[in-house]
Image (cartoon, helix red, strand yellow):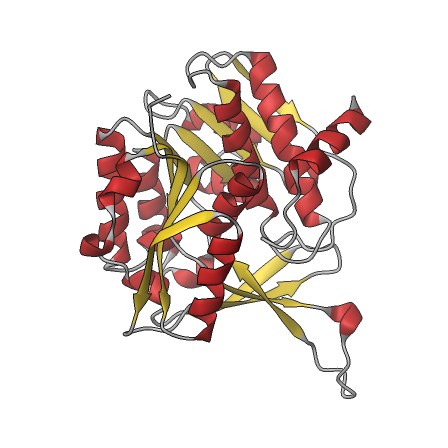
Amino acid sequence: MKNTQFSLTTLGEILIDFTPIKEHIQNHNGNPCFEQNPGGAPANVLACFAKLGGKASFIGAVGRDSFGSFLKNVLDEQNINSEGLIIKDNADTTLAFVHLSENGDRSFSFYRRPGADTQIAIEDVPIHLVEQSDIFHFGTLSLTNEPSRSATLYAVQKAAAAGCIISFDPNWRAPLWESVESGLEQMRCGLTYANLLKVSEEEAEMLTGISDPVKAGQNLLSDTTRLVVVTLGSKGCAYCHKNSCGELPTFDIKAVDTTGAGDSFWGALLYRFLELGTSINNLSKEQIIDICTFANASGSLCASRRGAIPGLASRDEIDTLIKTKA
């Protein structure tokens, strides 16, 4: 790896997840109650990475409001460098209300017209944070609108030129796009930069038209994209690399809230990958299974708790869970 200041820098949305707390409803009318939790996929990935001990830096924007102050404090409490967090006066912090099904799966309602996360501009991006990172990670929610779209692509291009490993998560959220076609266009744009790619089963099929996750993953490999991991929820994940492709089951844990579970999965995978100290090209089958097992454990533990960042597991918890399966 490079001699860098940060192991991982992410750029993108940081927001408030209002998570339902069914078991703690006190309203006499039976109205649902929501708990304020920090969220946003790039921030969740980074928080998981930092909790495991990685050097982490965040770039994004919040509003000049109580929610923005809360999120700034969360980054600081998680030992994440918040130098790149921009405070915007022209938009409020983005809010997402999470709706949970009986098995813990979630859907979202967003308050983001515009949200501060979409207002980060090229001139706001601290390029020294980008260039001084081993891995630069981004998703598509910062590609939905300008000026954040241009700012994101500017940062990705600078990261690639500086020799950073580029990590990408399409993170499909239909309500935030004008159309499926516009979303797919930006997802494919992100693919052109990605060295490490995380996609859900739905996203893999959207991008390839292939329902089999392993075959879809193989289809997404390219000269640029060297490792593809398809998350399969309670079924685990599929992985594709020039040296090995396959599926790996996850751990048998009751899901309570899957919000952030995929981000916890990816933050743990990036951490374990760097910990192994090898290049993407040289990953062996055994090493890929190692990092995916570590990621599965992290994602499973997060899904067993409420909230994305509050539900993150420690290194000891992940290692203990892996030992129970050994």
Query: Relative to the observer, which residue lies in front, 279 or 56?
Result: 56
Q: Position of residue 267 (x, y in %)?
A: 53, 38
Left or right: 299 in relation to 185: right
Q: Quadrant of the N terminus?
A: top left
Q: Quadrant of residue 153?
A: top left
Q: Position of residue 324 (x, y in %)?
A: 81, 28
The residue furthest left is: 123
User: Is 213 rendered above or below residue 92?
Assistant: above
User: Is 160 rendered above or below residue 126?
Assistant: above
User: Is 144 rendered above or below residue 96?
Assistant: above
Q: How many marks?
A: 0
* Residue 295 seen in render: yes
Q: Position of residue 318 (x, y in %)?
A: 69, 34
Left or right: 146 in relation to 208: left
Tell me the residue at 44%/61% (across/down).
Answer: 72
Q: Quadrant of the C terminus?
A: top right
* Residue 40 seen in render: no
Left or right: 313 in relation to 227: right
Q: Position of residue 54 (x, y in %)?
A: 50, 35
Query: Relative to the observer, which residue lies in front, 300 or 188?
Result: 300
Tell me the residue at 56%/31% (across/down).
Answer: 213
Query: Relative to the observer, which residue lies in front, 29 or 107?
Result: 29
Q: Quadrant of residue 128?
A: top left
Tell me the residue at 66%/43% (across/down).
Answer: 313
Left or right: 260 in relation to 217: right
